Image (cartoon, helix red, strand yellow):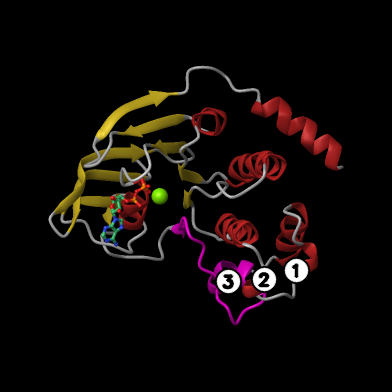
Amino acid sequence: MEHLNVSQISHSFGDQPVLKDISFSLDHGEFVSVLGPSGSGKSTLFSLVGGLLQPHSGDILLEGESIVGKSGSISYTPQTPSLFPWRTILGNVLLGQEISGEKNSEKALEMLERAGLSSYEHAYPHELSGGMKQRVSFIRSVLSPQSLILLDEPFSALDEFTRTDMQKWLLSMWEEHQRSILFVTHNIEEALFLSDRIIILSPRPATVQKEIRVPFSRPRDEELLLTEDFLE
Ligand code: ADP
Ligand code: MG
């Protein structure tokens, strides 16, 4: 059975249609990117799948069960990161794990260090820049126990070096933990580097214009091995 099945969902804001009959699915362990012009409805689509909005029609199935309007069964990082202002950065990162009762602060600290945030472990969200908050939100998502992760342009505010490192780290987490990932980007190179499959949305009201299976074997596996050797 597919991990996620989005079936003919449509959504409007007022009388403005944003998404029209969107259908696609995600297999277990697949990495799928959603590409589309700015304003086409990518973030709206993710809010629907993440359960923060309810579609006007259509269904969203997680392992065969409808999750329309239900948040919590999927790990969702919105485009604008929302961190809890009263929790420290480490506290924010560990939140998803605390809910499931499996705390792994070692991994969290390792990731914060890799993201250049080790000196912010005890800081509070208001002390961080937008790009830093985005990284914290991303780390929280990837360390949470849910097997399906939605990431809405998680790397858009990052400089080139940090972005490349975060991309590689995401791929290593994905491979190690057998997650399924649905990823929004407007960067075609990023989508090609990361994904098994790319879904392209048309301009608003968005429909699925095209689905592409990334046809070549990416150099990422070799690059990952090099990174691991380097880190040891
Ligand atoms: P993308 O993420 O692809 O840039 P969005 O999903 O953020 O696109 O937005 C799609 C369209 O829906 C845009 O025209 C945007 O202005 C509109 N929109 C998004 N959220 C709302 C909202 N809460 N209320 C009204 N219009 C919205
Ligand atoms: Mg968006």
Q: Which residue is mark 2?
A: 89
Three-letter amino acid code at the position of disc 1 = Tyr
Whether the residue under disc 2 has CB within 8 Å of ligand 2: no
| 128 is higher (above) or lower (below) than 183 | below
Task: Check if residue 160 falls in the magenta segment.
Answer: no
State the SS at label 2.
helix
Q: Residue furthest bottom?
A: 86
Q: CA distance from mark 1 to mark 2?
A: 7 Å
Gap between marks 3 and 1 measured at Cα: 16 Å
Tell me: 191 left or right of 116: left
Q: Residue at x 55, y 70 (%)?
A: 83
* Secondary element type, mark 1: helix
Q: Amino acid at mark 2?
A: Ile
Which residue is at a point 63% across and 48% down the rendered structure image? 158
Contact, mark 3 vs mark 1 (Cβ under 8 Å): no
Disc 3 element: helix
- The label shown at residue 120 is 1
Q: Residue at x 70, y 42 (%)?
A: 165
Q: Residue at x 17, y 52 (%)?
A: 16
Q: Which of the two discs, 3 and 1, labels the residue nearer the N terminus? A: 3
Residues at discs 1 and 2 in contact (Cβ within 8 Å): yes
Region in magenta: 75-100
Query: Residue 93 is drawn in which quadrant?
Result: bottom right
Q: Look at the numbered disc 3 and say if its residue's Cβ is closer than 8 Å to ligand 2.
A: no
Q: Which mark is residue 95?
A: 3
